Image (tube, helix red, strand yellow):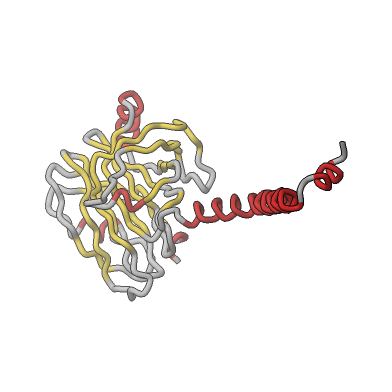
Amino acid sequence: MRFDKAIARMPTGLACAFLLLLVCASAAGAQAPVAHHQSTAATATMRPPTWGLHGMVLFGGADGLFASHLPMFHAPHDYHVVIALQLPPDIDAAMRTRLAKAPSLWTLVPEKFELARLALGAAHPLTEFKADIVEGHFERGGKTVYPGVVVRVIRTERFIQLDPDARSATTAQYLPIGQGRTWFLVKEVHARPDFDHVVMLSSLHAPTAISVPVNGIARPADDAIKALLPPGTNVIGSVYYDTDDLQ
């Protein structure tokens, strides 16, 4: 029997109710894709403000490994963050040996995560993440040596949000990072434009923070840094120096 004839044979009230149900079902079906689209858009906007791919410089030596987030003056990368970390035993030992020999550039390419979870006192602190370990700069021709490595966060050494309105200064603050006999000076990113700088030291004792005279974004000479360090502490060389990301 045809569908329209079946409706015609129904009592008037029943036929009207049936037609109303069909109209409602059709309208709900037509709106389903829109609802799905709205749900997808809402999920995207609900991501935390510091969610993203946060590249890092990897440095260290015999006594430990560290990583410094590559900061920029825009979200979600407008934070200067330094962490102490640990890699799987065989890779950890290999990287400590490599990095202890001489200053060389290695970078981490982590999976996307919320950078704010590395802050001291974070409600849900990040304890580990996966990352590719790259010899060289991962965005400038670097070579992936260890893909998909689990990086365990030991502690956060520094977590500071950048101030895009800060004015350039005539001096730069260098903060000591390390333990045992493995020490580095990490420059505090201050004003726009600025430069990112990590310096490897040779020291039997923990160095103190120093204030180094600077000329714009030019890299300070090793001798200028050494002159401010206590006797017995030497500058081995720069692990990382960059101005491109801080213009």
- Residue nearer the viewer, 163 or 75: 75
Give me the residue at 45% from left, 32% from top.
148
Horizontal side of residue 2 vs 234, given as left or right: right
Whether residue 185 is visible to the viewer of this picture, yes or no, is no
Quarter of the figure that contains the C terminus: bottom left
Can residue 41 be seen in this snapshot? yes
For the point 45% across and 60% down, the residue is 245
User: In the image, is 170 to the left or to the right of 112?
Assistant: left
Q: Residue 111 appears at what percent x and percent y?
A: 45, 41
Which image quarter: residue 67? top left
Residue 206 versus residue 191 in the image, above or below: above
* Total number of numbered discs in the rendering: 0
In the rendered image, the vertical position of residue 90 relative to residue 1, given as above or below: above
Location of residue 190 in the rendering, given as x and y in whole percent from the top left corner:
31, 66
Q: Nearer the viewer, residue 159 or 183?
A: 159
Residue found 71% across the figure and 48% down from its top: 14
